[in-house]
Image (tube, rainbow, N blue to C red):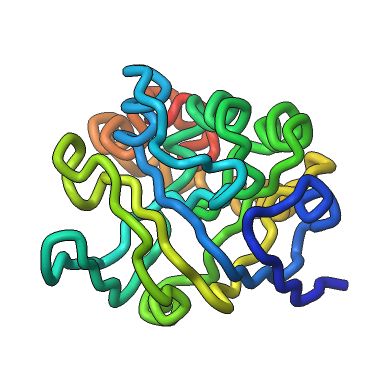
């Protein structure tokens, strides 16, 4: 049976390892955001984050807040929602290892093999947002903006935001430290409908959707080749 679990960041390894798929999680403390440009800026370009992520805000959210800068260095967030996490599969393992991340908040899930090979190894979990249209609720869980880093280099949406949060959630544990995946439980049932749908679409549409040609053999949503 799933539980409502309230945790305070930075998360410990035991915090993460005690979670199981289906649990509902609420967070207090600090989190940080990260999208493609944050990953590239740190992992590819070698820029070290200006904060100790492991010991302060070791929960990363794949998303950007709907935030504005009211005055220099003074930010206000009205809402926040996650973006599709499966696009970042190639970065996640290195980022976790280097910066001590214990949880990632996103949507769409990640491939189960990533949970088995990366999340389980590093003692981390994947938390998925609950449905659509509740970005404002998540925004109410943001009590303040601690800092925004790399705004000039990456732009405000892609910058690393450090957010103070309280009762931030709910999030569902989609991938836990055992390698289990909540999404994987329903993939077979969902995927049987994709073949018929894809056969009716021209190849140029399929390629635009998944940037692969053989969508019947490589499911668009969960395959690692999606970019």
Up/down of 174 relative to 44, above or below:
below
Quarter placement of the N terminus? bottom right
Front position in the image: 204 or 168: 168
- Determine whether, in the image, residue 129 is placed left or right of residue 102: left
**Residue 174 image-quadrant placement:** bottom right
- Determine whether, in the image, residue 121 is placed left or right of residue 18: left
**Residue 218 visible within the image:** no
- Location of residue 65 in the rendering, given as x and y in whole percent from the top left corner: 31, 63
Q: Residue at x 19, y 51 (%)?
A: 156
Up/down of 110 relative to 166, above or below:
above
**Residue 68 visible within the image:** yes
- Determine whether, in the image, residue 123 is placed left or right of residue 218: right
Front position in the image: 207 or 198: 207
Q: Residue at x 61, y 46 (%)?
A: 55
- Determine whether, in the image, residue 179 is placed left or right of residue 67: right
- Location of residue 26 in the rendering, given as x and y in whole percent from the top left corner: 63, 72
- Location of residue 104 in the rendering, given as x and y in whole percent from the top left corner: 57, 49
Up/down of 187 relative to 212, above or below:
below
Front position in the image: 13 or 107: 13
Q: Residue at x 49, y 46 (%)?
A: 196
């Amino acid at each position: 049976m799933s539980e409502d679990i309230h945790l305070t960041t930075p998360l410990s390894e035991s915090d993460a390892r005690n979670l199981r798929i289906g649990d509902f999680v609420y967070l207090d403390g600090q989190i940080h955001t990260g999208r493609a440009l944050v990953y590239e800026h740190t992992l590819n370009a070698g820029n070290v984050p200006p904060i100790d992520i492991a010991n302060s805000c070791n929960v990363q959210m794949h998303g950007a807040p709907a935030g504005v800068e009211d005055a220099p260095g003074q930010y206000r967030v009205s809402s926040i929602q996650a973006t599709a996490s499966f696009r970042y599969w190639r970065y996640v393992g290195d980022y976790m290892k280097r910066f001590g991340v214990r949880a990632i908040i996103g949507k769409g899930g990640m491939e189960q093999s990533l949970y088995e090979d990366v999340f389980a190894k590093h003692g981390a979990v994947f938390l998925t947002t609950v449905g659509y249209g509740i970005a404002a609720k998540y925004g109410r869980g943001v009590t303040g903006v601690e800092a925004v880093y790399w705004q000039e280099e990456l732009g405000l949406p892609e910058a690393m935001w450090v957010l103070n949060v309280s009762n931030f959630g709910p999030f569902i544990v989609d991938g836990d430290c055992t390698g289990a995946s909540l999404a994987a439980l329903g993939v077979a049932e969902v995927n049987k409908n994709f073949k018929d749908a894809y056969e009716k679409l021209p190849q140029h549409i399929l390629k635009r959707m998944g940037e692969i040609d053989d969508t019947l053999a490589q499911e668009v949503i969960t395959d690692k080749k999606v970019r």
